Amino acid sequence: MAAAGGGGGGGGRATTSGCGLKRRYAPHDQEEETMNQDQSSKEDWCGRLWNGMDLLKDVTENKHVLPTGLEGIDTLLGGGLCQGQLTEVTGPSSSGKTQVCLHSASHAAVKHMGVVMYLDTSNSFSPSRIATIIDGTNDLSDQRGFDLPHKERLKTMMRSIVCKSVFDIFGMFEVLHQLEVSLLNDKVKSGGRKICLLIIDSISSLLAPIIGGKYPQGRSMMISVAMILKKLAYKHNLSVLVTNHMVSAGNGAVKPALGESWKAVPHVRLVISREHGSNICTATVLKHTLLVFPLAI
């Protein structure tokens, strides 16, 4: 998805990326005013002290779940992808990680939950697969637009999924900055609906090359991306879904990539696997900050 640029009126410039997000350069006085407004909003979010009742109210009233449309995974996750949290799906190659992303995006579109931002780092996004999943959804009779002709209904749903190709860490920083500015200005919308789901498939293809390689600040950059994603999720009530690959842990075992520094980042970690030649996936929850698991004492 190539980027396009254009000029704007009123003494400012605007550039537009392939995902339709605009980064505006305002005159100095307007820029200073915007910076002051952004600073106060950041202080409200970062500097506020929350008591237990505030946190409970926020979780119960504002932090809901977005179903993926995959019954087994939704059951494991307590209903789906938690708003305000970062969920990681990890697993070996061809285990079904991208399919979880495509199903999640499709389900959000079918249920008119909001806009889906899909950041594709490895050319894995398949619009034809998305259309097939939407067409295969059986429970459309109660959805808005069900009475529209098939092509119009499909077009409406597909338009709520916005895809952007990102191939390096610097491009990721730029896209996330544009997204944050657009969210602050309430510009990421489709049909009056705000963005509800941010998908990055895969996060490890961007982060793995900079860890321990030619970038001495690689780990710091990784943690910066993590902080930005978690801030976007919490501040704007998004569900963030990322995929990660597996690496050798020795003795024939495997473990999620990106090391110990990344291990603490996701609120939820889900491992999926699939036997060679089988269409049946096995999913295991490694970590979930909201679910209570019984302890064996």
Image (cartoon, rainbow, N blue to C red):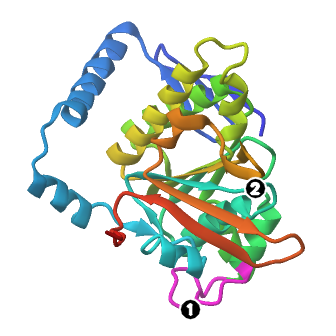
Q: Nearer the viewer, residue 88 or 131?
A: 88
Can residue 139 be found in the magenta stretch? yes
Three-letter residue code for mark 1: Ser
Residue 185 visible? The answer is no
Q: Which residue is mark 2?
A: 92
Please state the horizontal and vertical placement of residue 59, each as a whole percent of the image. Answer: 25, 61
Q: Are marks 1 and 2 in contact (CB under 8 Å)?
A: no
Q: Nearer the viewer, residue 148 or 207?
A: 207
Taking the view exactly as shown, the residue that stands out farthest to the top is: 28
The answer to whether residue 102 is above or below residue 19 is: below
Write the residue at 50% across / 23% down. Answer: 24
Please state the horizontal and vertical placement of residue 204, each as a whole percent of the image. Answer: 67, 39
Write the residue at 59% across / 85% down. Answer: 146
The answer to whether residue 105 is above or below residue 71 is: above
Q: Earlier in the sequence, mark 1 or mark 2?
A: 2
Q: Nearer the viewer, residue 17 or 274?
A: 274
Residue 252 visible? The answer is yes
Question: Closer to the camera: disc 1 or disc 2?
Answer: 2
